[in-house]
Amino acid sequence: MHFENEILPSSLLDDTLSSSEIVEKIERMKQDKFIKTKYHDKIKTRKDGRQFYVIIDRRQITSTTLDGLYKKLWELEFGRENASLSVIYPEWLIWKRDNTSVCAKTLKEYTILWEKFFKGNPLTEIPIKNLAAKDYIAFFRQLTKGETMTKKSFTNTKSLLNGIYSYAIEQEIASFNPIRDIDCRQFSFKPVNHFDEAFTTEERDRLLKHLSGNNSIYSLAIQLDFCLVLRIGELLALRWSDIEGGNIHIQGQLLTETEMNDDLTFKARTRTNVQHIKGNTDKGFRYQPLTDNAKEILKRIKAVNPDGEYILMRDGKQLLQDTFNEHLKKHCIEAGIKPRSSHKIRFTNASILYNNGMPLANLQNLLGHTTSAMTLHYIRSVTPAETTKEIMLSSLG
């Protein structure tokens, strides 16, 4: 670590200091130097020499010692009351890690958003107490100019800011959240083709036909997934003991976890089976009926994994989401259809069930959703274009 024209003081050459602590100390030294340079000629002394003072905007700041006055001036320039977004953001992220049930995946998404949209923007260096709705409107217009940002990405960015403000208000750094006063309907977003977020019934049939004679464990896992409406973590956590008669009991998930360090970096990922469902709500625990096709696939899986505790295992180890998606992509390409992720299988199956008359409330229970609005988000058009054309011509012709 090199600093031009500067010699590091011995206090910074201590091997016990971490790199983040060294950076913090250097930043404080720079701030102290700034204060002394800026106010040196403005500081005055009472005639009796017992008090030092400086006048700023008709406000007199005093102290009985010069060091004491410098500390007050530092607090005025860099203290909590003048904290900016760039100062509060890392504090908030660590606070959120330590005081809420937020998962590391969400924290990582916040760090990606910050790096992409906030880092280096002058807005983040202004004291948060001085920012108004108009400042954020200008910022949002800059982000959405030319419809280059999706509404989902915009919503996530706004959520990050709302989180920072909630923390800042709790810490008495800010008194209100100006973002609440913004009508976001004035911004235009990048269009998203939701019709391409699921397999059509034709693509589903083509892929399953391609896999029909393939008894490799990943092929069978994909085939089983198309018979259920599960999250991928739930699918990979299924045990043989979860099969109860003609149903399968959903009561756990395989989580890919990591932890955020105090310097906002992330530890290596670990995988853990947990006895709770996404969202930690009771809605996640549920039963799903096994179709005849699902039962047949389970028999084939039992033949290649007769002794495993979990249904989907290879060489004594559970299948993993990343590898599942790699095989899914490979088989999609082989079948001549557009590759999609495991999550899109869940979209596909939910849409097929809904389009075939399953009531929304029943579908919500199958998916393990807490609200019907969440379930409606999963409904996509899965009818092939040619079939749609035939229906339209016969109905409206």
Image (tube, rainbow, N blue to C red):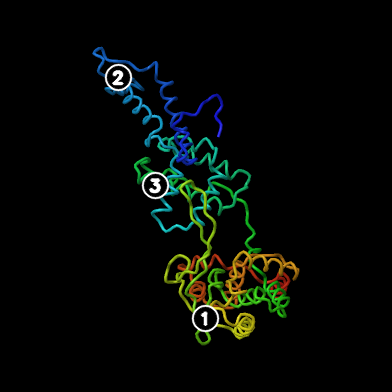
Structural crowding at the residue carrying mark 3, measured as other residues with C-alpha within 10 Å and reported as few (<14), some (14–19) or many (≥20): many
- Helix, strand or loop at label 3? It is helix
Residue shown at 55% from the left, 76% from the top: 310
Q: Residues within 10 Å of mark 2 (few under 14, many from 20)?
A: many
Q: Residue at label 1?
A: 248
In front of the other: label 2 or label 3?
Answer: 2
Q: Which residue is mark 3?
A: 167
Circles 2 and 1: CB atoms closer than 8 Å: no
Kind of residue at badge 1: Ile
Query: x and y percent of residue 360 in the render?
Result: 51, 73
The reply to whether residue 396 is visible in this rendering is no
* Residue 364 seen in the figure: yes
Residue at which label 2 appears:
52
Residue 347 in the image: state x and y as whole percent. 59, 68
Q: Who comes first in sequence, dot 2 or dot 1?
A: 2
Which residue corresponds to the image point at 51% horizontal and 75% vertical from the top-left? 366
Q: Position of residue 372 (x, y in %)?
A: 48, 68
First-in-chain label (3 vs 1): 3
Toward the viewer: 131 or 328?
A: 328
> Cα distance, mark 2 to mark 1?
77 Å
Furthest toward the bottom, the residue is: 245
Which quadrant does the C terminus fall into? bottom right
